[in-house]
Image (cartoon, rainbow, N blue to C red):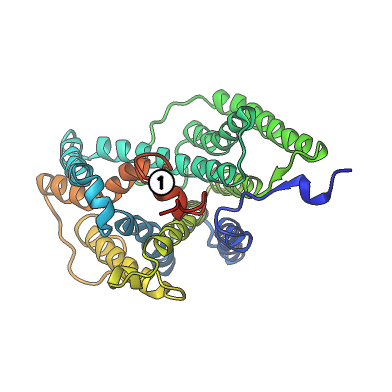
Amino acid sequence: MTSPASRFRNGWIFSPAVDVAVFAGPLVAAAAVVFAFARAGRLHDDVPPWLFAVLVVGCDVAHVWSTLFRTYLDPEERARHPQRLAAVPLACFVGGVVLYSLDDSGVVFWRVLAYVAAFHFVRQQFGWMAYAARRAGETSKLDRRLDALAVYNATVFPLLWWHAHLPRAFDWFVRGDFVAGTPEWAATAGHVAHWAINGAWLGRQAWLFAAGRGVNLTKLLVLSTTWAAWYGGIVLLDSDVAFTATNVLAHGVPYFALVHKWGRARWDGARGAVAAAFRPAAWPLFYAPLFAIAFVEEHAWDRLVWHEQGSLFVGPAAALPASALAVVVALLATPQATHYVLDAFLWRTGSGNPLLAERLGFRRPSSP
């Protein structure tokens, strides 16, 4: 007789409590924001300064800067990939200047950056599913393919819907960054396929449970929260507040947790300022510098480019000519673009990152 325990697999990426906190917690927080704003009749207002400070500065931009711990502040990484760490930000800056200079409005630059960002967000969710499968020791090719199909379905379909219903009350970066013209019938057909794929993945989980093969609860958690954030924030709700809350929190919070888990193992027993940020109960030392750098960056963005958050970012606003904007915008976007590119390499548990799997707890440390 199959025991109840055999019907589930241990795929927890961090731990049961932390996984629930970092994957479901952002969704609960986003839902609370949406409910509060809807109840106040402000769901369709612009994101207010205080919420901008929490979501954009404190989560979105700060999580980008947390990549520093995994790269430029780690002597192992600097020694292993010096050319990559030097070339990527330089290429991002030069490419940004060229793209922004192609037209007076900079729309080509913002369009390229938006699609790269969307790809990055989609791939991160796939990465969580892959981590959960690896943590549980899964080897089934069928499940690997179904997992990939399901997570891309949960993320790419909302993007298809978005493209077919432009303009929306929200944008990825700026108005017009996504290309309009996708016919509505494509979204309608995609909707049918979307629910069919959801049904196929859930059906497979039901079969695994009934057969005593084990359902990976972490994959279920990741996929369900991904679907709720993307479908709810893009398809169901046409609100800048809702999209910002779901998009930013679901992406940034788990990333903070991943960097911190890696750092705890990487700097265990070491001394120094970086090691101190990863000591137990030292979250303020880890997070405070990231928030400070993010605030400085967003202050520069607002005073030099956007001119929208004067109550949050004090000081004179500069009206820059187009030639100067090309350089300033490309420079300010370089940390973000660098984060997108480097993340394609940093978290792969292969020969390029020989100790990553051990530090994330996916395998036991090698014997000395």
Kindly identify which residue carries mark 1: 347
Q: Who's the residue at 43% across and 72% down the image?
A: 283
Residue 175 in sight in this render:
no
Q: Classify 270 as above or below 95.
A: below
**Residue 157 on image: x %, y %:** 55, 33
Towards the viewer: 176 or 214: 214
**Left or right of 104: which side holds 114?**
right
Q: Residue furthest front?
A: 368
Towards the viewer: 189 or 129: 129
Q: Who's the residue at 46% across and 76% down the image?
A: 281
Q: What residue type is disc 1 on?
A: Trp
**Callout 1: 10 Å neighbours few (<14), some, many (20+)?**
many
**Left or right of 266: which side holds 107?**
left
Residue 133 lies in what quarter of the image?
top right
**Residue 268 on image: x %, y %:** 40, 67
**Left or right of 111: which side holds 97?**
left
Residue 298 lies in what quarter of the image?
bottom left
